[in-house]
Amino acid sequence: MDEGAPPSGAPRSRPPRARARLLRPRTRVDWFLTVIRVAVLIVLTVGFTAFIAQEINPDNPFARWANPDATGLTGAQFRGLVISGVAQGSMYGLIALGYSMVYGVLGFINFAHGEVFMVGAMTGMITSNKLADAGLWESNFIGSLVFIVVVSIIVSSLTAVVMERVAYRPLRGAPRLIPLITSIGVSFFLQNASVVLLGPASKSYPNVPDWVKAKHTFLQIEGAKILVIVVAALSMAALWYYVDRTKTGKAMRAVAEDAEIASLMGIDVNRTIVKVFAVGGAMAGMAGILWGILFRSVIHTTGFLPGIKAFSAAVVGGIGHLGGAMAGGLSIGVAESVGPLLILEPLGVSGVSQLRDAVAFSMLIIVLLVRPAGLFGERLPAEDRA
Amino acid sequence: MNKKLMTLLAALFALSLFAAACGDDGDGEAADTATAPAATEAPDEPADEPVDEMMDHLGDGSLGEVTVDAGGAVQIRSLNAITGDVAFFGLPLERAVILAIEDYGPIHGFDVDLGTTLDDLCSNDGGQAAAQIVVADEDVLGVIGTSCSGAAVAAAPLITDAGMVMISGGNTSPALTSDLAGTPGENYNVGYYRTAHNDLFQGAAVAKFVFGELGLTTAATIHDGDPYTQGLAQAFADAFEAEGGTITGFSAVNKEDTDMVPVLTEIAAGGPAALFFPIFQPAGDFVADQAPGVSGLEDTVLLAADGLLNTNYLALPQTAGMYFSGPDSRFGENVNQSTGKTAQDFLAAYEERWGEAPAAPFWAHGYDATTMLLDAIAAASYVDADGNLHVDRQGIRDYLNSIEGFSGLIGTINCDDFGDCGAARITVVQNIGGEENAVASMDNVVFSFVP
């Protein structure tokens, strides 16, 4: 599945196909796409050049022409933006892994995955507040953190597994659209279940120790962000090892390649699919805790927007490709953090900070315009595109 | 084919009429059962007006008349933000309406019925949905609400078009009334009133505090696109520049944003000495938490407004030392002239009934708004020979338009031509810090402003 293999493993014949595409006469759609690509490129170039100009000197005539109120950013401010984007992006990446793995194996988008992330964050909130009441949160922060990570991973994996058993397994073999719609239903169910169980107001994590808030190293990064980036990197490495080096991982890849043949080879397909959901859920649970540490607040809709962005990240990276999911997450996180001030503000667009979601999704569109299969994705044969 | 379609449409239309009729019946029954006890109490109350003084009431009938049958109840509604993140703000308002109705007693011997209390969800959609429920019941005379200006923008046109009046204890956006210089706001509707202050006063108060008291000459603001937050941020920016200060940034976030580093970086680029963010929770939590970590904002003074002035927010560790503007809640010995109650009486009753103090200001505004509406209904109605109560909708507006020198919990209330009836007394409080001081911080006044 990390090869981005098509679910039914159809025979590949890429070189002749690619040649055929080149030889095909250009249609109006092709011209239209080219025009859009050029327009996007111009906006990006002008915006970025104006940014460079205003960094050199805010009174630079070019910067003034693009935005009369140009101010420019200091190095520390720019660094802060990038780091905040990387931290946010690592969480998108962790969530995107779940989307990507399920797609690789079952070929449908599990929209309820964002809610699994929310369940992880909620579990962390409940557990950490209990620990704080008992006094353990302050006295042994690292120990408590490990504990809430374990609890949260268990709960969110269980949520994902139950979801698969109740909502998706009965639909195995149905057209792809049906589990997709079911997953939207599951997503609403989990959100509303959270409202019923925990109420509609936002809930806080307990206060974290000072070293988590303080800035560290020569880069002046907040402790919480270092924690998020390091933990996300470790989780990614562990997942890679699991999928690429263990026997279970091999089974997952085999099922992704062709479930029917895999079952003939003695692989328990249902069991493998359950494991895929469990691992995806665990990654989402981990992301939920990181979210809690970074923002210290969670509400029943917490999973919605990060879920959609993580899905975009999975598509940007090439859906079905694990490294691509992480790369997609990082690029969307950094783009939405840096993009408004790097491209839009120098162009004189007002209220740029409200446009961060627009920037994130524009990133998706731009990547798909250039590489329709995503950064690391493979072009699917026509019969597998659906 | 066309004929078939027509038949189908006709059938649908007939079905919907039938459904509507059934719905009305249901409502009527519910109201009847709800007010059944009132019928037994009614004879105890001697009718205030002699039956023959039929014409002695306000109004010319131009908006129609509502008849309450003998034994029925006068219908008003409460429309406040009672769930979600802003419930702390709407619940005290709703409870104030309940207490005010109880303190007021019957109107000409007729009980006042609040029906089911409605939720404005503090959003445009919520306000619209609830307003549609209100106007579907033609017996409703007036609405106390909404809590949030964003909800009022959608609710006020529907409610006022139906001939009802709307008196808000919580809306403060200038767009809903006027610019205080005779120009109606873009969302002003005839029939809309409020006892909450106009944010032009609040913006001016914060500007005077930052420029005059704190001696800071540069400031930036963040809003979230909601009419309340945007209007207040703009009012502050205008007043601050009028004082002689410089606005270095005027930016906005989305309500559901969590990572505030980009917007704070944008603000930091201008290097402001003060940052005023009149927004709501949870976005307000993230701004206060992340601002000190952004290069260039380490020493910036943080200020927020009444949307964040509640015990829940004051208890957060990151809000210690922050300043908050809001309505002056030092009501002292002010007496509501219609019920004879003071703020102390109200707070005692509130605490006894719900076991807690109100979590946010504006309860007094909701109380006064309710008594004003009930006074207006009393002035615009009469009892006929059969013992039915007739209420003139235009008369209610006439009464409210003419309010002058009304003594309320919030002080002396005068209504201007655009529905602004507030006392316009603003204070700035400073958060002492710590969960245990949250309630005390609400009264830790460091600056007060009277226009």
Image (cartoon, coloured by chain):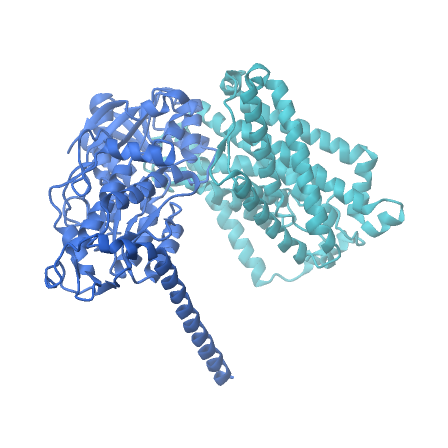
Chain colours: A cyan, B blue
Q: Quadrant of residue B436?
A: top left
Q: Is residue B331 above or below residue A145?
A: below
Tell which residue pokes out farthest to the right in this image.
Answer: A265
Q: Is residue B61 above or below residue B103?
A: below
Left or right of A172 in this view: B200 = left
Front-lying residue, B37 or A271: B37
Front-lying residue, A364 or A129: A129
Q: Position of residue A64 (x, y in %)?
A: 34, 36
Q: How many marks can you see?
A: 0
Is residue B172 visible to the viewer in this orientation of the structure? no
Q: Quadrant of residue B275?
A: top left
Q: Position of residue B123 (x, y in %)?
A: 38, 47
Tell which residue pokes out farthest to the top in this image.
Answer: A139
Q: Position of residue A374 (x, y in %)?
A: 64, 46
Q: Quadrant of residue B421?
A: top left
Left or right of A348 in this view: A381 = right
Is residue A238 visible to the viewer in this orientation of the structure? yes
- Residue at point 64%, 23% (across, down): A146
Q: Is residue B380 above or below residue A359?
A: below
- Residue at point 47%, 78% (across, down): B11
Q: Position of residue A202 (x, y in %)?
A: 47, 36
Position of the N terminus of chain A by quadrant? top right
Position of the C terminus of chain A by quadrant? bottom right
